[in-house]
Image (cartoon, rainbow, N blue to C red):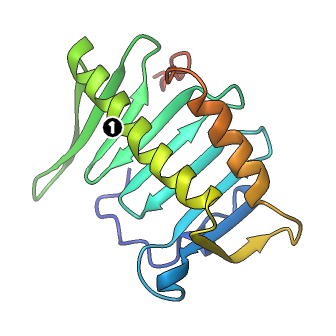
Amino acid sequence: MARNESDREDLYAEATAFVRRVELSPRENVGGGAAVVAGYRRNGVLTIYLSPDEMYQFTPAGELRRALLRDALFRTQGGTLAKLIRHRTPTATELLRHDLTADELAVFLSRTRERLAAFLLGLSDGDFLAVRQSPAEDVVSPLIQSLRAILASPLRLAPPLPTKRR
C-alpha cells in the first residue's frame, strides 16, 4: 500500500483496466465539475466512480464487491462489508478494519441504492453527456442495463474476496 495517495486528476485516463469505459458529465456542467466514470473489466466487473471519492464495484451478477466513500474502502465479507481506513503515523501506515453491523450494513446499502438510483434516473433522462468513451461504440446503454439489473432487487453482497496469504 502506498504511504501517500495522490488525488486522482483524470479518472478516465487512469481507468486503463476497463475494456469498455465512459466519462459522463452533467449536461449543465459539461467540461467542468463532477464527471462520472464507469467501466467494465474484461471479466465483466463493473466499476462506477460517481466522484473521485465515491466508487462502487459490482460482479457480473450485480453483487457489490467494493465501495469507496471519502477516506474509507469497503469490501465484501460475504455477509457484511469490512470498512477499511488507513491510519497514518510519521513512520507507518496501518489499515484499521471494522466489520459493519447488520444495522450499519442496512444503512450503507440503502444509501448506496439511493445514490445509484439517482444516477440511473439522470442517465436515463439524458441529464449526462458522454464526454469520452472507449471503444467508440455505445457504452452508456449497457451501463443503464447493468444499473437497472442491479437495482431491480435488493442490493446483494458478493462472496468474500480472497485475502492475502502470508
Q: Secondary structure at mark 1?
A: helix
Image quadrant containing the C terminus: top left
Q: Is residue 102 left or right of residue 136?
A: left
- Residue 99 makes an appearance in the image: no
List x then y, in percent, for residue 47: 59, 48
Question: Image quadrant of residue 148?
Answer: top right
Query: Which residue is outermost to the bottom?
Result: 31
List x then y, in percent, for residue 127: 56, 69
Q: Is residue 70 above or below residue 66?
A: below
Q: Nearer the viewer, residue 127 or 16?
A: 127
Q: Within 10 angstroms of label 1, few (less than 14), some, or many (20 or more) residues? A: few
How many numbered marks, from 0 up?
Answer: 1
User: Circle 1 is placed at which residue position?
Assistant: 111
List x then y, in percent, for residue 70: 27, 54
Q: Amino acid at mark 1?
A: Arg
List x then y, in percent, for residue 49: 50, 57
- Residue 36 makes an appearance in the image: yes
Q: Nearer the viewer, residue 144 or 53?
A: 144
Q: Is residue 53 left or right of residue 96?
A: right
Q: Is residue 130 left or right of residue 53?
A: right
Query: Which residue is outermost to the left?
Result: 89
Q: Is residue 149 above or below residue 162?
A: below
Q: Residue at x 29, y 59 (%)?
A: 3
Q: Is residue 23 left or right of residue 156?
A: right
Question: Image quadrant of residue 4?
Answer: bottom left
Q: Residue at x 64, y 56 (%)?
A: 124
